[in-house]
Amino acid sequence: MEPVNILLDQLREIARASIEMLPHIVVAFVILLLTMGLNKLAIYSARRVLSGTKLRQSLKELFTLLVSIFIWVIGLMIAAVIVFPGLTPASILAGLGLGSVAIGFAFKDVFENFLAGIIILFRREMRIGDFIECEGIEGKVDQIAIRESHIRQTDGQLVIVPNSILFKNPLIIRTDQPVRRMTVICGVAYDADVDEARDVIRRAVEACDSVIQGEKPIQIFAQEFGESSINFEVTWWTGSKPVDVRESRDQIVSAVKRALDDAGIEIPFPYRTLTFKEPLPLQSGTTSADD
């Protein structure tokens, strides 16, 4: 019966210790309830304060989340100290420090994306609605979250990009400015008058309503002697969105082609001159009956 008596003594000790800790557990439970109420009040207050600012919505949600985490950490620490009187805030922080090192190694990529997301949220260069390009990914920024960003490609597909990729690699923001400079190459025949061709092209570009004129100049330069044409570099400014660029390029190419045709200026096909090492025998188009 000795083992049974030892077991009963242990159970009595556990029951007595539980009864002694019951007031501490009740107080800790009340602390958790108060923490829950304070957390809701803090979230409500933070949203009211941040609603009047010009911060991004994702950044506002980040601040609210950090306030909530801070309140819960403090509340849980107080409840733990009440339930376990031998526990001190210093020992809790020491345990959290050791645990955070292990967690940091285990979730390195997650924390890297998290920190990159915070930095991107504080940037003003990349906004929701911008068209960007990074590492072969091109599209419209639909959402900037803490860990990832959502890029909607022009064909409608959604690409979820880890924020560390956008942070560590060169990022092209195509709509950072409302206008963008465009360039096409137009060739005319060698027997065409260069000055006349330049004037015809300029008038055609100026007549297009997609071209932004005024402070932004239209520039037409004779660029090079091509294989079968004199090539002009035609430069103008238009809207920076991809659809603006495609529509404007289509309009410019059509207008320049039509203007050059009306002026009788040829846009030549490539010419080829063939040279043979040996003379070629010429054969008449008619043959005799004996052949």
Image (spheres, grey):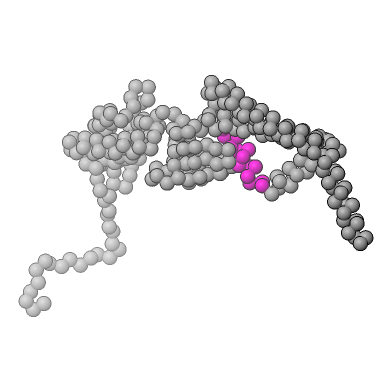
Furthest residue to the bottom?
A: 290
Judge left or right: residue 49 versus residue 23: left
Judge left or right: residue 267 versus residue 178: left
Give 80 or 172, whichever is nearer the viewer: 80
Query: Residue 12 at what x, y percent from top left?
Result: 87, 49
The residue sitting at 18% across, 35% down in the picture is: 263
Judge left or right: residue 51 versus residue 218: right
The residue sitting at 42% across, 46% down in the picture is: 157
Give 109 or 7, whichever is nearer the viewer: 7
Quadrant housing the N terminus: bottom right
Q: Is residue 168 visible?
A: no
Judge left or right: residue 36 versus residue 244: right
Query: Residue 240 at what x, y percent from top left?
Result: 40, 33
Q: Main secondary structure of the magenta part?
A: helix
Query: Residue 97 at what x, y percent from top left?
Result: 77, 40
Give 172 or 128, whichever is nearer the viewer: 128
The residue sitting at 29% across, 43% down in the picture is: 229
Query: Residue 34 at what x, y percent from top left?
Result: 69, 30
Q: Is residue 31 visible?
A: yes
The residue sitting at 37% across, 31% down in the picture is: 239
Range of residues picked out in magenta: 107-121
Give 61 or 75, whichever is nearer the viewer: 75
Furthest residue to the front?
A: 1
The stretch drawn in magenta includes residue 114? yes
Quadrant housing the C terminus: bottom left
Furthest residue to the right?
A: 2
